[in-house]
Image: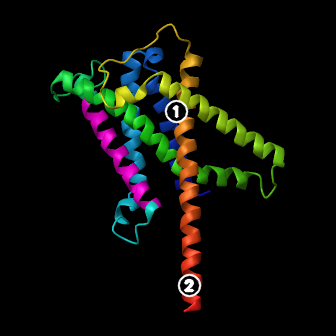
């Protein structure tokens, strides 16, 4: 693996870990939450600098369904991060308290809450769309050795169980009401253990990764069949 790719993977791994820490506000507390947020913002900027070529290719090539969806998700993540960055600075009492950036606190609070949960879902979807790369790296580590069929199905079952629990948590916590600001206040259970909090958010992330990964695979297979079908038609003509 090239050094640049290792740096990209390292940044993405740190961003994933920070995303989970940021969602666990009742565990980290206000000050640490702000420092994690500042770190996420810096890593997000670094991520975009390292992937700047993606923007240069926006107007090149054809836009099929999968590329359209990936582009929508990527720009949605960017918008949510910009909203989080601005609202986080406005609300800051520790890291950015000295910055001369102000605004309506109520608006910033609502923006921060909605963008937090939208960002969590969108970043999980983004990760799922690139999960094939992680699977490919794992296969390369095996150096051509294949896992036993039972192990493969065991991993698939584990993924399905995690996704199912993640969906349950997502519904139980009524995350949709926060995303669409139907509920203006987030309920935090400060008596809940750290293990339980992180397990729930890991499962919810796993659910959206699961959905995105298999949706991406399905679209890829459908597109591939359509391409083969067109080639056969062209050959007959």
Closer to the N terminus: mark 1 or mark 2?
Answer: 1
Most common secondary structure along the magenta stretch? helix
In this rendering, does residue 128 appear at all?
A: yes
Q: CA distance from mark 1 to mark 2?
A: 48 Å
Horizontally, is 95 left or right of 139 in the view? left
**Front in this rendered view, residue 176 or 80:** 176
Query: Which quadrant: the N terminus?
Result: bottom right
**162 over 195 or under it: above or below:** below
Image point (65%, 38%), residue name: 160
Q: Position of residue 120 (x, y in %)?
A: 43, 35
- Span shown in magenta: 66-87
Q: Position of residue 20 (x, y in %)?
A: 49, 29
Can you tell which of label 1 and label 2 is closer to the viewer? 2
| Residue under numbered circle 2 | 233
Residue 17 is marked as 1
**108 over 138 or under it: above or below:** above
The answer to which image quadrant residue 159 occupies is: top right
Residue 76 in magenta stretch? yes
Image point (51%, 45%), residue name: 127
The answer to which image quadrant residue 71 occupies is: bottom left
Query: Which quadrant: the C terminus?
Result: bottom right
The answer to which image quadrant residue 3 occupies is: bottom right
Q: Residues within 10 Å of mark 2 (few under 14, many from 20)?
A: few
């Amino acid at each position: 693996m090239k050094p640049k790719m290792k740096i990209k993977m390292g940044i993405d791994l740190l961003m994933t870990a920070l995303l989970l820490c940021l969602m666990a506000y009742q565990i980290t507390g206000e000050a640490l939450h702000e420092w994690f947020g500042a770190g996420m913002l810096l890593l997000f900027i670094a991520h975009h600098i390292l992937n700047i070529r993606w923007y240069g290719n926006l107007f090149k090539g054809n836009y099929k369904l999968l590329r359209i969806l990936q582009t929508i998700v990527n720009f949605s993540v960017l918008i949510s991060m910009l909203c989080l960055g601005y609202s986080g600075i406005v609300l800051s009492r520790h890291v950015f308290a000295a910055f001369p950036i102000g605004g309506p606190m109520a608006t910033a609070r609502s923006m921060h809450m909605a963008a937090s949960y939208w960002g969590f879902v969108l970043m999980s979807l983004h990760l799922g769309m690139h999960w094939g790369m992680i699977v490919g790296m794992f296969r390369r580590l095996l150096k051509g050795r294949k896992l036993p069929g039972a192990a493969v199905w065991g991993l698939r079952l584990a993924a399905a169980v995690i996704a199912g629990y993640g969906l349950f948590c997502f519904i139980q916590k009524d995350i949709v009401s926060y995303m669409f600001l139907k509920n203006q206040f987030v309920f935090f259970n400060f008596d809940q253990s750290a293990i339980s909090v992180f397990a729930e958010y890991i499962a919810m992330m796993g659910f959206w990764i699961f959905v995105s990964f298999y949706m991406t695979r399905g679209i890829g297979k459908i597109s591939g069949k359509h391409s083969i079908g067109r080639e056969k038609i062209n050959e007959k003509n």
